[in-house]
Amino acid sequence: MAESGTDVAGHRPGAPRRGPSRLGGRAALWVAFGAVHLGLALLNLYAPGWPLGDVTAVYRVWAETAQLGFLRMGIDTPWVYPILAFAPMTAALAFGSAWYGVTWLGMVTVLDAIAFSVLLGRGAFSRRRRAAAWWWLAFLAFLGPIALGRIDAVTVPFAIVGLLWAAGRPRVAAVLLTVATWIKVWPAALVAAMLVAHRRRFEVFTVAATLSIGIIGVSLIAGSGANAFGFVAEQAERGLQIEAPLAVAWMWWIVAGTDAATIVYDRDILTFQIEGPGADVAASLTTPLMVLGIAAVLAAGARSARRGAHLGALLPPLAVAFTTVLMLANKVGSPQFVTWLAAPVVLGLVLGGSRFLTPAAVAAAIAVLTHVIYPYWYAWLLIANPGFVLLLTVKVVLLFVLLGWSVRAVWQAGSERRPRTAS
């Protein structure tokens, strides 16, 4: 992220450029970028477990029904996603239905390439940016095909660029993060982090609010009515999905051999959920738990901001904290949610360097566990295999570790005055 007086690559005008690094140059990084994305694309297309299933069997159907004039999701009927999610789903039809999956993977790769280019910056770049770039590529590889094969993958490049530009271009950052929010809600956590940490928060709020009103207005003109907010109600009506953190207790209960709790498939939401005593109550508690978690993080962040914490010290851990709360206090917990961690961790590595190694390592471990669970051997989780329920449990524990680290870092940002450093 470019601090005041620095360029996009994180260098101050006239400052000496740094020499070669053992982390490799730009060419090596771009070769690795191509190799990782090609490998993930091939896994999406040919690996067992149908990793691209949501894209080719769900997104494509939604796009085709709208193209044929039958039904526009989010306009003619309530939808589980915000209205702009329909844009990439429709764009993937550009080369015809038969090429939908390949087009989707190409589109996500292009978006990732744009974000990767911004991360590397112009001219020579610092060791921190090299390290962040290598970490992101490793994170994608660790996470596996789900890193490209869901709508969440479209929002991650927007989020990375938005955070990297948050200091020097807060209005542009607000546009990018707001657009991402209207594709999939989670980047709202990053907007919240900017509103707390940034001194130009009023500009961020004004841009985000104005753009949101414009998006809602266009959808209303298109005939959406209340369906423009249908994703709120659709999410509220969901049950407790088996990957949700709160579902771990019921999963272990099933492992223990109970007949009272079972795993069922919801054909309306197209997810596997817990059915049993207390599961509906737990699902209903996720929203108030999320509100309490966000309020606690907000209070810690506001304290540090009032005490003069620098943006570079406060924004990265605050973004991690808000994002982790959304993941932990969530009734869904789908594997693609792990992609959300990439943006705040990349920002933290760029600005914090070695201080951000702990969350980077924890996030990478979460990605590996997620890849083991989904998609190849997901059926083992569906029958509550003890080994896979243990993997899920460890993943949840690591998310709590990540939350604890980030909240502590947010608090410390307001306790210590750190000098601004170029990335």
Image (tube, rainbow, N blue to C red):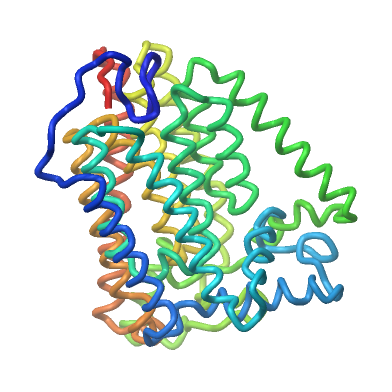
- Residue drawn at x 23%, y 59% as measured from the top left: 365
Residue 171: name its quadrant.
top right
| Image quarter in which the N terminus is found | top left
Residue 276 visible to an observer of this rendering? no
Residue 409: name its quadrant.
top left
Q: Nearer the viewer, residue 141 or 369?
A: 141
- Residue drawn at x 62%, y 68% as measured from the top left: 92
301 left or right, relative to 212? left
Q: Is residue 182 above or below residue 95?
A: above
Q: Position of residue 247 (x, y in %)?
A: 43, 67
Q: Position of residue 99 (x, y in %)?
A: 58, 79
Q: Is residue 280 above or below residue 408?
A: below
Q: Nearer the viewer, residue 75 or 267?
A: 75
22 left or right, relative to 208? left
| Image quarter in which the C terminus is found | top left
- Residue drawn at x 29%, y 66% as measured from the top left: 35
Residue 120 visible to an observer of this rendering? yes
Residue 139: name its quadrant.
bottom left
Count of numbered circles in the view? 0
- Residue drawn at x 75%, y 43% as measured from the top left: 215
Q: Position of residue 32 (x, y in %)?
A: 26, 59
Q: Nearer the viewer, residue 46 or 76?
A: 46
Q: Nearer the viewer, residue 420 or 16?
A: 16
Q: Residue furthest left?
A: 22
Q: Is residue 247 above or below residue 318?
A: below
Q: Position of residue 54 (x, y in %)?
A: 55, 75
